[in-house]
Image: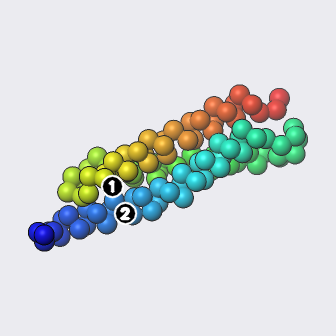
Amino acid sequence: MTPEGGGAVAAKIAQFVALAIAVPAILWGGFAVWSTLNPPICGDAIGGIGLGVMASWVFDLPAGLLALGIGIGVKRGAPRLRRLCLGAAVILLCLPVIATALLQRLHCP
């Protein structure tokens, strides 16, 4: 067993922090997509679904960019955590786009 340097430990901590921020953002984005797919009767939402989609952009875009930056930029961390960061970034950057597309397609006239 070889001792790790300070850079490798800091890299793993950065990867853990990125994933700790990414998981709640993925849950929020998933909820935004789900609530857009299952809208209430026309007139009952009063803009709540659109607000959820906007909040999905506000939370998921910065978290996705953070996870992407750490996944690409941190080379000394754990390779598995790096792949998880990159996968979480792809999911985080896709969720607001999907929610917006569904909102524009399924919203009440």
Report the residue at 82% width, 32% height from top: 108
Verify CB contact (< 8 Å) between mark 2 and mark 1: yes
The residue most toward the front is 1
Can see residue 50? no
Please determine whether, in this image, residue 23 is positioned above or below residue 47: below
Q: Give, as a three-letter code, the residue at label 2.
A: Phe
Closer to the chain start, of discs 2 and 1, is 2
Q: Which residue is mark 2?
A: 16
Name the spot of residue 46 as percent of width and height, x first.
Answer: 83, 46
Instruction: Give the image quarter of residue 50.
Output: top right
Give the crowd class for mark 1: few <14, some 14-19, many >=20 residues within 10 Å.
some
Q: Which residue is mark 1?
A: 81
Name the spot of residue 22 as percent of width and height, x first.
Answer: 47, 55
In the rendered view, does 70 fall on the left or right side of 55?
left
- Label 1 element class: helix
In the rendered view, does 96 fall on the left or right side of 42?
left
Report the residue at 33% width, 55% height from top: 81
Circle 2 or circle 1, nearest the eye: 1
